[in-house]
Amino acid sequence: MSVEDGKLTVEVWRGAGGLGRFETFEVPRQESQTVLDVVSWIQQYADPTLTYRYACRVGMCGSCAMMVNGVPRWTCRTHVGKVATGDSLTVEPLRNLPVIKDLAADMDPFFDKWVQAEAVHHPSETRHDPMRAVDADSSARQQANAGIECINCAVCYAACDTVSGNPDYLGPAALQRAWTLYNDEREADPEAILDAVSGVGGCHNCHSMGSCAQYCPNELNPLAAIAGLKRETAKRVFRRRKNA
Amino acid sequence: MKAPPRAHPLWLAFVLHRVSGLALALFLPVHFWILAKAVTAPGELNSFLQLTEQPLVKLAEFGLVFLLAVHLFGGLRLLALEWLPWSDAQKTLAAGAVGVAVLVSGTFFLNAI
């Protein structure tokens, strides 16, 4: 039997808020079929009321992440053949986030925490100043470069057990962004970033379980970025003691 | 909702460190209580020390050494992970060097005892 003749049994989470149940759909198998293709097929041919989120379909926008067979994944770049157990697939909304409806998770807490971590650029110059030359080989720039491919998909946030244990924890993505900006030589206020990430829900909550790095679809390492923040916040304590 | 599979090395290292720490925390008060008997009740200490000749207690001592070693190296691992801004390749090389050194010196150590 070729892939084209096969059927896929898909369990899809349906519901709004905290309430819901799994609904089963039969979806035709196709070659090079992605999990997003499966979800789109259900919405187009089986049940138009199915709610989910996607935009670019090529792993750039970070909006289509869902739990696939219990693992957080970017569905547009996840091939069914690689993740289906036999002919069955389970698709749920992202873990650790409230559910708006069906497969669409509410991303507000995730992005609110980016702002709380001061993971926003504080400009040091205006548009009227000449562009500053950035030394691509400097060690700080290398640290910053390591995290800039983050697409804000929240896969790391869904994978993190510390986030599920502590709702105040800023999470791997926001902290990695903070670390990137901290190392950016154009950043005007790196101290504000250290203040923001050393509070109650900050980088020191991380237990180094490493699920963020394990499941990041872009193979980034938020764990290393959080370790960097831990180092800098700790060094600052000793600096302050010395200057006091 | 079900958590994603956790059987990856960093998560297992976390659990090993946490569980060995808890077990040692439970062991230490008992350890100090027994030691204190050397001063308060030497007779009781002696009868307890006879108990340590039992094979089961010998086995438990092996477990204790294992827990201590695991917790010690788990702590060193965390210190390296958080305090050394090394690249992944450098860390792998360093861990490899430690592994080979333990293997070589451990072989000589086992010959000596």
Image: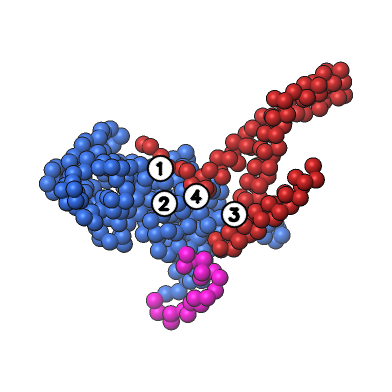
Chain colours: A blue, B red
Q: Which residue is mark 4?
A: A210
Is A129 included in the stretch rendered in magenta? yes
Pinpoint the chain carrying mark 1.
Answer: B
The chain under label 2 reads A
Main secondary structure found in the magenta portion: loop
| Marks 3 and 4, how far apart at CA | 11 Å
* Between A199 and B101, the one nearer to me in the picture: B101
What element does badge 2 sit on? helix
The amino acid type found where label 4 is placed reads Gly
Q: CA distance from mark 2 to mark 3?
A: 19 Å
The residue furthest bottom is: A130
* Secondary element type, mark 1: loop
Q: Residue furthest left?
A: A45
Q: Which residue is mark 2?
A: A215
Q: Which residue is mark 1?
A: B4
Residues A34 and A195: in front is: A34
Label 3 element class:
helix
Give, as a three-letter code, the residue at label 3. Leu
Q: Chain of mark 4?
A: A
